[in-house]
Image (cartoon, helix red, strand yellow):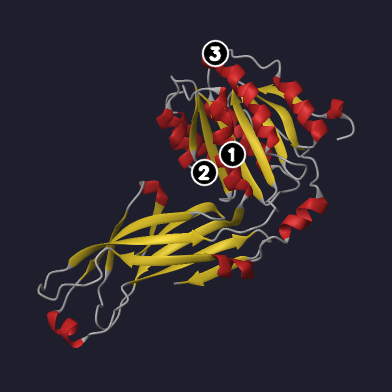
Amino acid sequence: MGNQSSIGNNVRIFGANPLKWFEYRDDEPLDNQNSHQNSEKLTSKDLNEVTKLTLKLKKKTIQSSSFNPQTFPMLVSLVTESLKTTNKAPLDLVCVIDNSGSMGGHKIELVKNSFNYLLDFLGDSDRLSIIIFDHQTSRLVPLIRTTEDNKKYILQQLKDVQGQGGTDINLGMVNAFKVLQQRRYKNSVTSIFLLSDGLDKGAQQKVRKSLESSSLPHDITINTFGFGRDHDPQLMSDIAGLRDGNFYFVEKLDTVDEAFVDCLGGLLSSVAQNVSLKISPEKSDVLSDVKILKAYGEASMWAKEGDSYVTKMSNIITGRQKDFVVELEIPVSKKELQDQEKSVKVARAQVMMTALDGEKNYKDY
């Protein structure tokens, strides 16, 4: 950006409904040339070739010696092939930094120093915004491209951040939601990084409610980084789980690069977003009353739709596999099984996703 003195909107925000009135809408335009190159990376048609899904029963044979229904765990695996490409999906990233009193001293210095590593992974096509919070919140850096000049500006803005005041994680996260809600432009991948010690009891419930009321698209992930040995890993993990993200523990500076490599490597290697996996029982003349008894994982991970179970993922990335387990109940008729010697399909699945070019893709298994 040519005039860096115009960057920023460092207004302190606090009180009831603190961000209801606040307007940004000043995000920097995208790097159109690089964004165009990345948009050609993978199309909806390509997704059919690089993704596959398998459904496997732990036991392949149904015992015909019993008339009672039998239960079988089934493994459902969504696999994305590794792609050999130098192109990366451009990223919009909002970092929410806890500068409360509990983050004072070593923790806040560790956070500030960690940005030297973070910025190494971001290029001209990516954009970054920084939110800070204690018992109040402010936007330290608007959503700007991470060019070399802007990286210097970002590091300069972080220099004077100190740990002070109380802690309101939800307030900082709501400010981040506002930044993303009010974007005029949008890169193909979006994420929020929360950097905190998580010492704010009950914050995950508040953030959950704020996220639900924000109506942010489901392709936005939340990743959390817990700083210091006395951080609250459960709270940080819970917040990451709200949007298909990961939690990382950062105790020393030499562990920061590993955390950022893993997290940003995944985000920048996304091949699809807004992924929905639906698993349904397959009913036939032989087995007419197959049921899915349960889907394993946290309750919030699955939604029940009739006799089917549905889970959603913010994105899928190249070279990774996601596994899910459901439990099937299969009623057995001895006569029917004796009459049928061929294999019988007991479940089916449908994957719905959006390619980085914006086209929707549907695939049945």
Q: CA distance from mark 3 to mark 2?
A: 29 Å
| Residue type at tag 1 | Val
The residue carrying pointer 3 sits among few (fewer than 14), some (14 to 19) or many (20 or more) residues within 10 Å by Cα, namely: some
**Residue on which disc 3 sits:** 101
Report whether 321 appears left or right of 155: left
| Residue type at tag 3 | Gly
Q: Residue at (76%, 39%) from the top-left corner? A: 25
- Along the line of sight, which residue is nearer the eye, 253 or 172? 253
The residue carrying pointer 2 sits among few (fewer than 14), some (14 to 19) or many (20 or more) residues within 10 Å by Cα, namely: few
- Choose top left, top right, bottom left or bottom right for residue 94: top right
Q: Earlier in the sequence, mark 3 or mark 2?
A: 3
Q: Earlier in the sequence, mark 1 or mark 2?
A: 2
Q: Nearer the viewer, mark 1 or mark 2?
A: 1
Visible residue check, residue 20: no
**Residue on which disc 2 sits:** 212
Q: Residue at (46%, 21%) from the top-left corner? A: 199
Visible residue check, residue 254: yes
- Percent x, y for residue 354? 60, 61
Residue 163: numbered disc: none
- Along the line of sight, which residue is nearer the eye, 243 or 91? 91
Q: Residue at (61%, 59%) from the top-left corner? A: 83
**Residue on which disc 1 sits:** 261
Regarding mark 1 in the picture, which secondary structure is present there? Answer: helix
Marks 3/2 in contact by CB < 8 Å: the verdict is no
- Percent x, y for residue 259? 54, 35
Q: Is residue 291 above or below residue 248?
A: below
Q: Residue furthest bottom?
A: 339
